[in-house]
Image (cartoon, grey):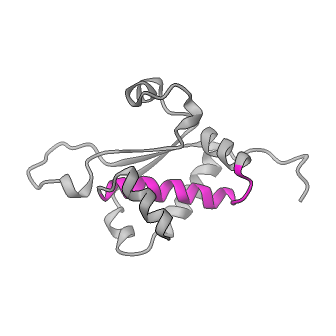
Amino acid sequence: MEWTSRLAPSLDEFAALAEAAFKALPEPFAGLSADVEIRIEDFAAEDVLDSLGIEDPFELTGLYQGVDLGRRSVLDSGVQPSMVFLYRRPILDEWCERGDVSLGELISHVLVHEIGHHFGLSDDDIHRIEDDA
């Protein structure tokens, strides 16, 4: 492959990779995640990083924001939609450092991790599942 003319994917191209990964989710996960909005940004906002105690914006590749399925109630009203944020620059940085997965695979991995939070899984739960797979 000729690399001298290659460019990093734009936010729109990155979003297309994320959308393909989202569409590839198997049932019943796909159906239960249909209302989750996917957002692509270069980096997390400063207030998000501050609230998580993260100083280096390259340390956060994705974030789930919302009420997970296990905590939802029919009595909830005016609840913001659940969102998964994928942060393009940290993901690209990790992809370059790793060199052992495709960009699409890494985006899918981060997306699935964040969707796991939509189902009420903690980071520890998700890491155990990944280790067992």
Tell me: residue 81, above or below residue 55. below
Identity of the residue drawn at 72% across and 59% down: 100
Q: Position of residue 4 (x, y in %)?
A: 91, 46
Q: Position of residue 79 (x, y in %)?
A: 21, 44
Q: Position of residue 61 (x, y in %)?
A: 54, 43
Name the main secondary structure of what is drawn in magenta.
helix
User: In the rendered view of the protein, which quadrant contains the N terminus?
Assistant: bottom right
Q: Nearer the viewer, residue 51 or 30?
A: 51
Identity of the residue drawn at 74% across and 54% down: 99
Judge from the rendering whether residue 15 lies leftward or rightward of residue 49; answer left or right.
Answer: right
Q: Is residue 106 magenta?
A: yes
Q: Nearer the viewer, residue 50 or 122?
A: 122
Identity of the residue drawn at 65% across and 51% down: 13
Tell me: residue 15, above or below residue 93. below
Q: Residue 89 lies in what quarter of the image?
A: top right
Q: Position of residue 98 (x, y in %)?
A: 70, 51
Q: Nearer the viewer, residue 45 or 129?
A: 129
Judge from the rendering whether residue 71 lies leftward or rightward of residue 118; answer left or right.
Answer: left
Identity of the residue drawn at 13% across and 54% down: 73
Q: Nearer the viewer, residue 109 or 32?
A: 109
Q: Residue furthest bottom?
A: 27
Please give the range of residues in magenta. 98-119
Q: Residue 43 lies in what quarter of the image?
A: top right
Tell me: residue 24, above or below residue 105. below
Q: Is residue 120 magenta?
A: no
The number of discs equals: 0
Judge from the rendering whether residue 17 lies leftward or rightward of residue 66; answer left or right.
Answer: right
Judge from the rendering whether residue 94 lies leftward or rightward of residue 55; answer left or right.
Answer: right
